[in-house]
């Protein structure tokens, strides 16, 4: 009824706008209204679903999906239909290998209380040993701290003294070069380096000569006889 009323209103509006100028347009409108009425009055029949029969897939058929041929799906069918599924309940029980694997996993993830207590005790003992070892290292380092500080200060003093001596020696060498050549010499010039090598060679010979002279004097010194005992 609603569809027929819509068609009548549409036809009236169309005639008003076009003044019924074309019979073909009217026929086209009538055909469309007829299709609309036919569509509105269509009442499809409900699908027939067979919910009473059990669906048992044929494992020998190539059309049956592989996941419907697994033992997991067999357990699902037996749980839904029971003995009507035609599945032997014994085939659903895990094999010996599967059962051993399940038991091993159960022991690994859910160990007995005694095993859990032993594991906790071992873990606490290991943590205690690590803590004691760390505390011992800290105590040893603290005991060495005064000597380490003193060594650091001594090394700092020696480095500062060495730097001072090198600066004094560099100033003396520059003065020696100016006195020898009569003008200031670049410390990187070959003349300056040659002079430094010559001076170091003379110093080495002088030290060697002094050492030999001290040795000769020591050997030439008279040996004092021990005092006679009374």
Image (spheres, grey):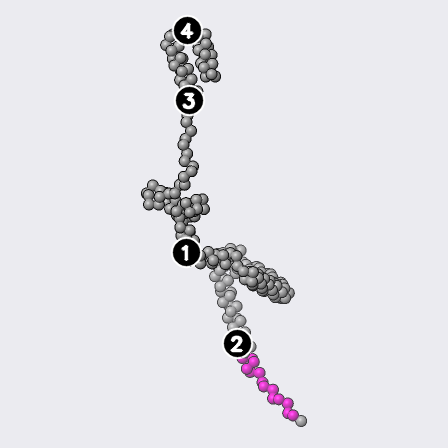
Q: Which residue is mark 4?
A: 20
- Expressed as whole percent of the image width and height from the top left, the position of residue 61 reads 33, 43
Query: Which residue is at a point 37% across and 43% down the rendered structure image?
Result: 57
Please tell me whether mark 3 sits on a helix, a strand or a loop.
loop
* Mark 2 / mark 1, whichever is N-terminal: 1
Span colored in magenta: 216-229
Is 226 magenta? The answer is yes
Quadrant (top left, top right, bottom left, bottom right) of the C terminus: bottom right
Query: Which residue is at a point 42% across and 29% down the rendered structure image?
Result: 46
Q: Dots 3 and 2: beta carbons under 8 Å?
A: no
Mark nearest the camera among 1 and 4 is: 1
What numbered label is drawn on residue 42? 3
Please tell me whether mark 4 sits on a helix, a strand or a loop.
loop
- Along the line of sight, the residue nearer the viewer: 12 or 21: 12
CA gap, disc 3 and disc 1: 58 Å
Would you call the spot at circle 1 few (<14 residues within 10 Å), some (14-19), or many (20 or more)?
few
């Amino acid at each position: 009824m609603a569809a027929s009323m819509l068609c009548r209103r549409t036809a009236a509006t169309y005639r008003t706008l076009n003044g019924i100028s074309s019979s073909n347009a009217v026929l086209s409108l009538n055909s469309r209204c007829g299709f609309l009425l036919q569509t509105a009055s269509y009442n499809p029949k409900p699908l027939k679903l067979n919910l009473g029969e059990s669906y048992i897939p044929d494992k020998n058929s190539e059309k049956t999906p592989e996941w419907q041929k697994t033992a997991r799906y067999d357990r699902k069918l037996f749980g839904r239909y029971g003995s009507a599924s035609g599945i032997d309940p014994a085939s659903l029980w895990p094999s010996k290998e599967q059962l051993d694997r399940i038991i091993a996993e159960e022991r690994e993830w859910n160990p007995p209380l005694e095993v859990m207590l032993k594991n906790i005790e071992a873990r606490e003992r290991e943590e205690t040993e690590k803590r004691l070892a760390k505390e011992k290292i800290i105590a040893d380092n603290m005991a060495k701290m005064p000597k380490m500080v003193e060594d650091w200060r001594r090394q700092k003093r020696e480095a500062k003294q060495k730097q001072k001596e090198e600066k004094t020696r560099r100033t003396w060498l520059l003065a020696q070069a100016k006195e020898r050549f009569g003008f200031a010499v670049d410390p990187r010039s070959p003349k300056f380096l040659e002079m430094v090598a010559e001076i170091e060679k003379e110093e080495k010979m002088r030290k060697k000569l002094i050492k030999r002279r001290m040795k000769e004097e020591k050997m030439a010194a008279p040996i004092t006889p021990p005092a006679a005992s009374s």
